[in-house]
Amino acid sequence: MDTITVKEIITKKGNQKITMLTCYDFSFAQLLDEAGVDMLLVGDSLANVLLGLTETRKVSFAQMLTHTAAVARAVKHSLVVADMPYVSYQKNPGKSLIYARKFMEAGARAVKIEWFDGAKRTSQGPKDCPAIIGNLIKNNIPVMGHIGLTPQTAHLLGGYKVQGKDKESAMRLVKQAKYLEELGVFSIVLECIPYQLAHYITANVNIPTIGIGAGAYCDGQVLVLYDMLGLYKKIKPKFVRVYKDLSLHVKEGVAAFIADVQGVAFPHPEESFSMKEEEWNALLTLLHSK
Ligand code: KIV
């Protein structure tokens, strides 16, 4: 199977639903790639599910880069999308191109940028998102947009809440989606918005929409891997479906390991290394001669 291209993702719109899962490491990346997921997002949600941080804003660029490289090393088919962390563009708008290029050098084939367009803005930051996106695209870096609930700036949106529930904020999101399309993004994540609004946006842009908590009418769906495999239990958003609860398997496996070690049932001789008998005897002679 050849590597899926950005162009192929776009042409799936209206033809085949698109799948995306977050992924943060080599071993899972191999599995998801072999399973045929279209896109692997090295999401900054790793701040929560891998690092135990309370906010995605706190993850560093170096951490994101390490995980992006690990995922990219494993992949043969899926399109790897690196999530630009807060520090790489909202905090340092002037350095966003440098950071995005580093992700591409590490093996990402696109980057994702969250667009926050709320009322409260600092002197630099969220207001720069469209300019930053335009600059990356001008420099041949494919960009995936992200609107609705944007976790990096959730504190400015009144918390982790469904967005676009009233006509004014819904209209803002429609405008953002259209503007992102004009800027040239190749797809847009719609996070936590009413399904009717996601349906409208999907029908009125020519690029794929990828929903998370945005209903069934999006062109594709994304979930956080650790949520859909039951590995992250701290919160369980309404839109998460746990496809396999691996936490039970992990706990069972670990309990069996503890019991085996304590009962001297692990390791077996065939799980151990041995020396030839004459080498061992020669060593004993040597040890006893000292
Ligand atoms: O970081 C992430 O996991 C994301 C998804 C929620 C789309 O941005």
Image (spheres, grey):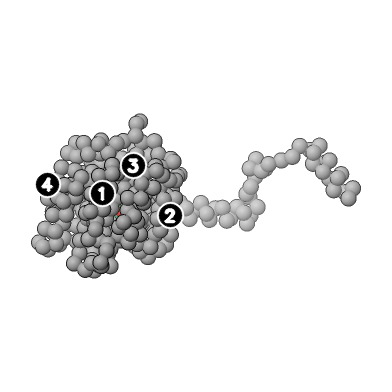
- Dot label at residue 109: 3
Residue at coordinates 66% horizontally, 43% vertically from top-left?
272
Give the number of the mark in front: 1 or 2: 1
CA gap between label 3 and label 2 equals 18 Å
Mark 1 or 2, nearer chain start:
2
Give the number of the mark in front: 4 or 1: 1
Q: Are marks 3 and 4 in contact (CB under 8 Å)?
A: no
Which residue, given by chain and number where applicable, does mark 4 sit on?
204
Give the number of the mark in front: 3 or 4: 3
Mark 1: amino acid? Asn
Mark 3 or 1, nearer chain start:
3
Q: Nearer the viewer, residue 136 or 52?
A: 136
Which residue, given by chain and number where applicable, does mark 2 sit on?
62
CA gap between label 1 and label 2 equals 22 Å
Give the number of the mark in front: 4 or 2: 2
Which residue, given by chain and number where applicable, does mark 1 sit on?
135
Side of 176 relative to 227 (left or right)? left
**Residue 134 percent coordinates (x, y):** 23, 49
